[in-house]
Image (spheres, grey):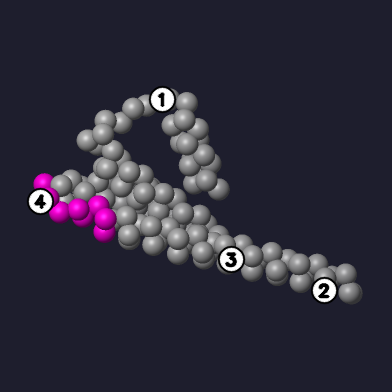
Amino acid sequence: MWAVLGLLVGIFLGLIANFHIPPEYSKYVAIAILAALDSVVGAILASMQKTFDNKIFITGFFANAVLAAALTYLGNMLDVDISLAAIIVFGTRIFNNFATIRRLFFSRKRINVLEQKSGEEN
């Protein structure tokens, strides 16, 4: 729940702040945001599975963002677009985690409906 609230506050502040990112840094920021979003979606999934650990979330959030930006920088120095690999990996993880969240959500809804029907029959 806190991860979603933090994400919404961050989006709100980002829309209000009118902060400009120079074009030469936009690739690094985009990759860092993608890595951070991967951590947030992973935290939501862990919370639903009752395995959430705040230390793992905080360290993963910042470590993934810094590592992804550093790999993007290294790729630019070597004139290799490593950021594409990060986009593919983080994008795949985000979609897989979101699919798992969706399945968990609907399976819990189905269980609640079945329990309600069972309670009405008794």
Mark 2 lies on residue: 118
Amino acid type of the residue that numbered disc 4 sits on in the rendered structure: Leu
Amino acid type of the residue that numbered disc 2 sits on in the rendered structure: Ser
Q: Position of residue 7 (x, y in %)?
A: 48, 42
Is residue 99 found inside the magenta-colored segment of the image?
no
Which of the marked residues, 2 or 3, is nearer the chain's N terminus? 3
Q: CA distance from mark 2 to mark 4?
A: 63 Å
Q: Position of residue 76 (x, y in %)?
A: 15, 47
Say which of marks 2 and 1 sits in front.
1
- Image quadrant in which the C terminus is located: bottom right
Secondary structure of the residue carrying tag 1 is loop
Mark 3 lies on residue: 104
Amino acid type of the residue that numbered disc 3 sits on in the rendered structure: Leu
User: What range of the chain is rendered magenta?
Assistant: 77-85
Secondary structure of the residue carrying tag 3 is helix
In the rendered image, is residue 115 in sight? yes
Q: Residues within 10 Å of mark 4 (few under 14, many from 20)?
A: few
Amino acid type of the residue that numbered disc 1 sits on in the rendered structure: Asn
Which of the marked residues, 2 or 1, is nearer the chain's N terminus? 1
Compared with residue 39, is residue 121 higher up or lower down, i.e. above or below?
Answer: below
Q: Position of residue 106 (x, y in %)?
A: 64, 65
Please give the label number shown on residue 56: none
Q: CA distance from mark 3 to mark 4?
A: 42 Å
Q: CA distance from mark 2 to mark 3?
A: 21 Å
Are discs 2 and 4 less than 8 Å apart at CB? Answer: no
